Image: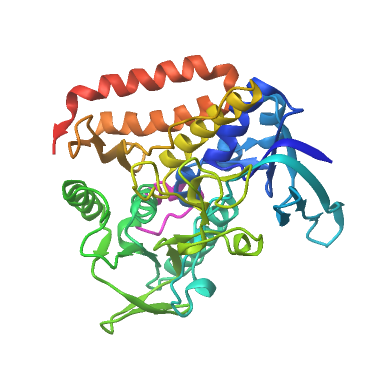
Amino acid sequence: MRGDIVIVGGGAGGLELASKLGRKLGPSKVMLIDSRLTHIWKPSLHEVAAGTLDIHQEGMSYQMLAHDNGFTFMYGALTALDPGAKRLTVGAIRTADNEEVLPSRTLEFNSLVLAVGSTSNYFGVPGAKEHTISLNATEDAERFRLTLLKLMAQAETRRENGADAGVDIVIIGGGATGVELAAELREASTAYTAYGFQHLVPRRDVRITLLEGAARILAPLPERVSTAALRLLNERGIKVVTECRVTDIAADQVSDREGHVYPVDLCVWAAGICAPEFLSTLGLPTGKNGQVEVDGFLGVKGNADIYAIGDCAGCVDGDGKVVPPRAQAAHQQADYLLKTFLLQAKGKPPQKLPYHYHDYGSLVSFGQTTTVGSLMGSLKGLSWFVEGFFARMMYISLHLLHHAAVLGKVRTGVLALARFLIKRSTPVVKLH
């Protein structure tokens, strides 16, 4: 079997690249490989975990997307790579009973793009891997949601029988994922009466603690954003502990360097990411956090016609800046490689300018109604603080823009709506 342009990983960057290339070049030229059958926008996983977003409503079938966008989809995980021979292996697919559904397959390629995302970095903390859930994929979010419902049902029964009961949730990591999950959980907890939990008082009985090692939450963002986020969490009855270095995690408690112990029924690890371990077995150069080393044109160093984008790529752009592992970076890199491959298809010279990362700011969601963040201005070092309804609309527009990229047949209407929301939001921003 042979593929012209093969993309491994159907996350934000990989799927957008496959969809845009497929619409231009067709299924005989573009193939996407992924170990799952369904795509979900990763920034939405905290909503799936909280139970405020149905994965069956949000998830998009890779097979359907392949049909609609003109690329070929192969189901399975990358298990081996021979860079010199331009050959890779996709592992077999088996059922829970170990019945083989699809055999192992070998595929030759002309160009390869690695877009396999990231996984959790536990930094060697004892018990972190064994006793926490990390929101890296839909199955993680679903496991969290179902575990939370089970714990609440048990607490409800104890409350009904007159016992003092509740659920202690500890989130380790005060970045965007941890903060958004904490806020979403508090909002969701007020709706749990729909599940028949009549004896639980959400603010009293669903106790949420957010632990952050830095001096403030959302440390990479402007201090004003961090301050606003802390205020919103406090208003929701969420306990925030900063400068907290977790040293040990057990099934029922989390301990920090200062000797504090936090009781826990359900623990989330959101304190750091690294590239998937299997990348180090592929014969490609890897660096910090296991990321594949790429040059300014997103090509893997020392390997012709192999590229890497997104969280798995250790990228320093044309200006010498380290590109952060963010969705907007993956989106930009996908568009850069789109131009690279389209030029190749037309027999034209390659791009002369290397990839350049543009930071457009960050938005952090606080449930279904509120968002805070910062937008980067066109002048260096200038940013605007945004909060409230219009910031929320801008956050939603990012989701719409992603859908527009992978659903070509509706892209015009979705893009128009997203751009309208962004334009209408501009007058309410405040100079930071």
In the depicted view, which residue is nearer to us: 156 or 117? 117
Considering every residue shown, the one lying at the far bottom of the view is 259
| Left-right relation of 367 to 74 | left
Depicted 125 relative to depicted 145: above or below: below
Q: Tell me, yes or no, whether the highlighted magenta stretch contains residue 38.
A: no
Residue 166: percent from left, percent from top: 39, 67
In the depicted view, which residue is nearer to us: 331 or 243? 331
Residue 304: percent from left, percent from top: 63, 45
- Where is the C terminus found, in terms of image quarters? top left
Residue 423: percent from left, percent from top: 29, 19
In the depicted view, which residue is nearer to us: 208 or 348? 348
Q: Tell me, yes or no, whether the highlighted magenta stretch contains residue 198.
A: yes
Query: Residue visible at 83% across and 50% down?
Result: 105
Colour convention? rainbow
- Where is the N terminus found, in terms of image quarters? top right
Residue 352: percent from left, percent from top: 46, 31
Depicted 386 relative to depicted 339: above or below: below
| Left-right relation of 399 to 31 | left
| Left-right relation of 371 to 342 | left
- Residue 51 shows in this picture: no
| Left-right relation of 214 to 104 | left
Query: Residue visible at 45% across and 60% down?
Result: 273
Query: Residue visible at 42% across and 50% down?
Result: 325
Residue interval drawn in magenta: 188-201
